[in-house]
Image: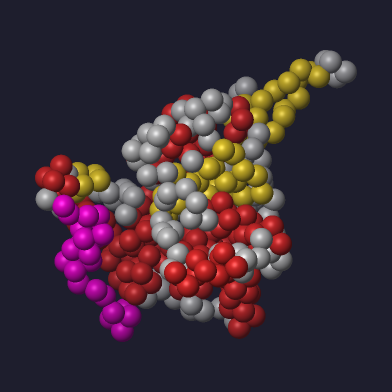
Amino acid sequence: MDMNKKEIINTVLNETKKAVRGKDDVLRSILTAILAGGHILIDDIPGVGKTTIAVAFSHTLGLDYKRVQFTPDVLPSDITGFSMYDKSSDSFRYMPGAAVTNFLLADEINRASPKTQSALLEVMQEGKLSVDGKSYDVPKPFIVMATQNPIGSSGTQDLPESQTDRFMIRISIGYPSKEDEINILKGITPASDIQPVLTGEALCSLQEEVKQVHMIDDLYAYIVSLAHLSRHHKDISLGISPRGAMALAAMSRAAAFIDGRNYVTPDDIQKVIPFTWGHRISLTGDARMTGKTTEQILNDILHSIPVPTLTEA
């Protein structure tokens, strides 16, 4: 990456930080997923800034933004749109839904009905909407940032594996430090006042450049070995799918791109694996009963596979 592009990336992050204090790693992870062309799932309690982050990124990236507050009565047509009869033309006219945008915030997605979640799943995977037998493309770039409250909160239900697998990453924000919370109370820049750094067209161009970041064959084999081990690990009941392996490769390229490199290193893979694969594996009942965590299991997998070096290529 030339210096100009690296400066653009840094400017995007610095501009977003004006509205979100003390969460630099979270913002970097989200931008990595966006550059990788993926969707983001934020799993955290209410009030820690999930919506603020979404608005800040949409403004910084210069994208059209829509928000849907998911509740049990939200219908699939609220997402996809619907056909309405137009008397003047004696025909049906398509009325776009919330998904016809560049940046969609799906707030509290795990409060919606499975039918509504499925409607969102299709557009996330295909980049298309189906209404009354007709398909409609969504604008590019298209990014879904979904939030969910912890399971067990009132009115929530687990997202099915087929839904969570469509998200490139899952992250948590967490509480701010005392110092950052004091600064928040003093006042921060409203997310709506964030200045745009990119345009949708420029973001699409950067996403295409990320796809060209080089990865040697040894690193492809490394990712596949990690995925295969997850499928046979004694503490894992559901391992990593080929889609999950593809997501890790894409995130690794984006991580290298943000660091100003046009090639992937093993460190890039290891850095992004916790939030790229953490929501894609399911632990066995015995593992949960003994207090093991997904993070511990992923660390075990990483330490079980020899790390390739670039000089071996």
Quadrant of the frame with the N terminus: bottom right
Tell how many labels. 0
Residue at horizontal 37 percent and vertical 59 percent from the top = 275
Give percent across and percent down for residue 268: 38, 72
Q: Would residue 51 be visible to someone looking at this image?
A: yes
Q: In this view, does 171 lie above or below 113?
A: below
Comparing 141 with 114, the one in front is: 114
Q: Residue at x 38, y 65 (%)?
A: 272
Query: Compared with residue 267, is residue 287 higher up or lower down, i.e. above or below?
Result: above
Residue in the image at 52% along x and 56% along y: 49
Q: In this rendering, is residue 205 above or below 136? A: below
Secondary structure mostly taken by the magenta-highlighted segment of the chain: helix
Q: Which residue is drawn at 61% across and 59% down?
A: 57
Residue 128 at x, y = what percent? Answer: 59, 38
Q: Is residue 193 left or right of residue 132?
A: right
**Rendered-image quadrant of the C terminus:** bottom left
| Nearest the eye: 180 or 174 | 180
Residue 301 on the magenta span:
yes
Say whether residue 138 is visible: no
- Looking at the image, residue 307 lies above or below residue 221: below
The magenta span reads: 291-313
